Image (cartoon, rainbow, N blue to C red):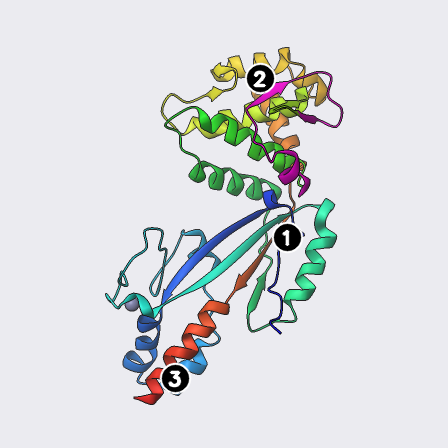
Amino acid sequence: MKKPDVSFDSIPGSAISKSTLKICLKCAFDVFTKQLKLTPRTAYSELKKHVPEEADFTGTATSRPHFFDERGLDHCPYCNGAKRWFASFHAVRIDSIASFEKERKKLWAALKKLPDRFVLWAPERTKMQIFSEWLERLNRSLSFETDNWLLDAAVSYIKRAAPSNDWNNILADGVRRVQLSRQVEDNSRFENGWLYVSPALYGDVLIVQHLLSRSHQHGGRTFEGRLTFQELMRRLRRIGYLEAKRIDADEPYEAFEQAIAALVDSGPDAVYYAVDRKDYLEKLKSIYEKKRER
Ligand SMILES: [Zn+2]
């Protein structure tokens, strides 16, 4: 009987980000057999230990023999080797928070039983770094050509603020509108395509939208229209956000800093990575066996 595959389903989807990194095994073997003059057998045993760095996965320093393959390349970008030399590493990143840390630990205990296949990392991060990286990933995933991103960004933030797998059921039919409401309990309520949110949550959404659009043309766009920084702060005061969040600074920049600090502080406090090497190890083995036959 086939063993069931490892599942990350116990972790809320909003806390997970996945990335796939390709490796060219022709390039990888060549380093050992051509440059270092090692036998294929030694090259194989060295390559079995190989794990890309976090910077390869994030794209900040992706280097040979690793690359991203969003367009479905037919040939290696470095050596022009054919597609059959490609193998994949799948990284699952979890931005963890106390509410599901128990599930995360349980999952990690299961992954530790497969030490060849899964490599586990827990890189040091401050809460602010975790927030900035989330914002950066969200920024890359959105299309700013139409205003649809405003809703996508809002829903992403709302899910992140209360990570839970229940969102999949609650929002199964899709969100048509995020509506400020002073009547909701527990920050949000979903009804007939509308997601009603409290002033505290709505204000956070406006801040996130403002931060996201700052780096784009016609910046400062939010559900409340295009706002300058001063207008944003006035709006936050008017909707009762500053009061709900107990932000007492009168000076707008100081109030904004307090708002960001509270928003960041309520977010994830640890980052975990699981790198799945299944495809890599299988392809590596099959290529090595073919090499040996020759
Ligand atoms: Zn190559």
In the rendering, which numbered label is found on residue 289?
A: 3
Q: Amino acid at mark 2?
A: Pro
Toward the viewer: 199 or 282? 282
* Spatial CA span between label 3 and label 1: 35 Å
Farthest left residue in view: 80
Q: Quadrant location of the C terminus?
A: bottom left
Q: Quadrant of the N terminus?
A: bottom right
State the image coordinates of residue 3 (x, y, percent, origin top left).
62, 70
**Which region shows up in magenta?**
165-190
The residue tagged 2 is 252
Q: Which image quadrant is residue 203 in?
A: top right
Q: Secondary structure at mark 2?
A: helix
Q: Nearer the viewer, residue 196 or 67?
A: 196
Q: Is residue 84 visible?
A: yes
Q: Is residue 294 above or below residue 259?
A: below
The residue under the point 33% across, 89% down is 293
Cα distance in 3D space between marks 1 and 2: 42 Å
